[in-house]
């Protein structure tokens, strides 16, 4: 297993982490199998989405904001980030991608994305290939 960090710069952000994950897969000991990408955070997530248009990330954040508004949840009384927790739970902390010949088998328009819901922060990402 390897890990790397991502520094987010905005409260809501979607960052393409495919190149970093592919670098780990390429030098890994397992040429074929599955790659698990996991963010150990309660207010960030990992997803697969389109890589050609950066507006997709903005659209995802806006759609989730419409579904899960800020400032109306019980947890907001503690640290005012309940919406971030709910969004992260819906999107999920991980994705699994097949690996063949040391290459992520993503579709033409797919990338692995770290989704920030409560930034800016330093986020960890774990990558394990089996």
Image: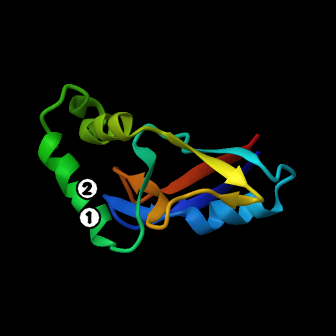
- Give SS at disc 1: helix
Q: CA distance from mark 1 to mark 2?
A: 5 Å
Instruction: Please determine whether, in this image, residue 112 is positioned above or below residue 95.
Output: below
- Snapshot quadrant of residue 128: top right
Q: Is residue 79 left or right of residue 124?
A: left
Residue in the image at 18% along x and 51% along y: 63
Q: Nearer the viewer, residue 50 or 116?
A: 50
- For this orientation, the residue located farthest to the right is 29
Residue 15, image x, y percentages: 44, 64
Q: Is residue 21 left or right of residue 2?
A: left
Residue in the image at 66% along x and 57% along y: 4
- Snapshot quadrant of residue 72: top left
Q: Nearer the viewer, residue 42 or 121?
A: 42
* Colour style of the rendered protein structure: rainbow
Residue 43, image x, y percentages: 39, 42
Neighbor class of circle 1 (other Cα within 10 Å; few <14, some 14-19, many 20+) is some
Residue under numbered circle 1: 58
Can residue 37 be seen here? The reply is yes
Residue under numbered circle 2: 61
Instruction: Please determine whether, in this image, residue 59 is positioned above or below residue 84.
Output: below
Residue 23, image x, y percentages: 71, 66
Using the image, tell me which numbered label, if any, was put on residue 25.
Answer: none
Q: Is residue 82 left or right of residue 27?
A: left
- Snapshot quadrant of residue 52: bottom left
Residue in the image at 22% along x and 47% along y: 64
């Amino acid at each position: 297993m390897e890990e790397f960090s991502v520094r987010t710069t905005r409260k809501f952000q979607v960052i393409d982490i495919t190149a970093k994950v592919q670098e780990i897969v390429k030098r890994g000991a397992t040429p074929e199998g599955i790659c698990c990408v996991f963010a150990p955070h309660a207010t960030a997530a990992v997803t697969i989405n389109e890589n050609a248009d950066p507006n997709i990330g903005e659209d995802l954040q806006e759609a989730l904001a419409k579904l899960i508004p800020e400032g109306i949840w019980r947890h907001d009384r503690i640290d005012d980030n309940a919406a971030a927790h709910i969004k992260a739970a819906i999107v999920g902390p991980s994705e699994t991608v097949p690996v063949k010949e040391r290459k992520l088998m993503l579709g033409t328009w797919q990338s692995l994305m770290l989704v920030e819901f409560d930034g800016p922060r330093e986020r960890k990402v774990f990558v394990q290939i089996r």
